[in-house]
Image: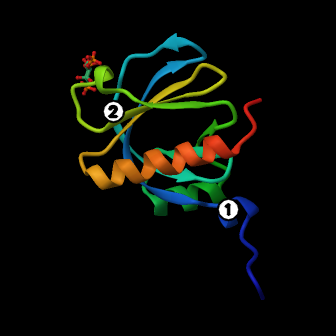
């Protein structure tokens, strides 16, 4: 019998591990706390999983949901001044959530920056 994957999985554009810190929620500043996150980019959203991909997949089956970020109207910019780390960019959502993403490996962070920027630029602004 064929297994039909959920539509979201068919639209995945990029996935991988990055360092992530959420620094604001609904405009309210949060204490910065870096952690490794499994990140999945599809056409209009980013999903952050706290766990490994394997763990994330099995958790999805049990109804556990990742943090989901709506890219419609979102902003992305390099954020050198927001961290002592290298290769940091920030995503700001319409709802006022702010995330920093980081990798020590230059080409990895560049690929992610351009993939997310392209996704945002293709979407309607509101
Ligand atoms: C923070 C922690 C972060 C650091 C942040 C510190 O301390 O060391 O790693 O951010 O710097 O405040 P704590 O764990 O006590 O909250 P970077 O690694 O991005 O520099 P910041 O306050 O200058 O953002």
Q: Is residue 100 left or right of residue 82?
A: right
Does residue 109 sit above or below 16 in this rendering? above
What residue is drawn where x is 63% and y is 42%? 121
Disc 2 and disc 1: Cα gap in Å?
A: 28 Å
Q: Please, is residue 15 above or below residue 118 in the view? A: below
Residue 122 marker = none
Furthest toward the bottom, the residue is 1
Q: Is mark 2 within 8 Å of ligand 1?
A: yes
Residue 3 place in picture, x, y as percent: 73, 79
Is residue 106 left or right of 61 when viewed as pictured? left
Would residue 10 appear left or right of 52 to someone viewing this image? right
Residue 106 rendering spot, x and y as whole percentages: 27, 50
Q: Which residue is mark 2?
A: 34
Looking at the image, in which quadrant does ligand 1 appear?
top left
Query: Which residue is rendered at x = 57% and y = 52% of the image?
Result: 41
Element under disc 2: loop
Q: Quadrant of residue 58?
A: bottom right
| Residue 99 locus on image (x, y percent) | 47, 30
Q: Position of residue 38 (x, y in %)?
A: 45, 51
Determine which residue is flagged by label 1. Answer: 11
């Amino acid at each position: 019998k064929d297994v039909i994957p959920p539509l979201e999985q068919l639209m995945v554009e990029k996935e991988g591990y990055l360092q992530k810190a959420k620094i604001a929620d609904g405009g309210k500043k949060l204490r910065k706390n870096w952690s490794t996150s499994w990140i999945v980019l599809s056409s209009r959203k980013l999903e952050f999983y706290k766990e490994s991909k394997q763990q994330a997949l099995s958790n999805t089956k049990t109804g556990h949901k990742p943090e989901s970020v709506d890219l419609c109207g979102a902003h992305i910019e390099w954020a050198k001044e927001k961290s002592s780390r290298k290769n940091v960019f920030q995503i700001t959502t319409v709802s006022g959530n702010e995330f920093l993403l980081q990798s020590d490996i230059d080409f990895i962070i560049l690929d992610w920056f351009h993939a997310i920027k392209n996704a945002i630029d293709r979407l309607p602004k509101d």
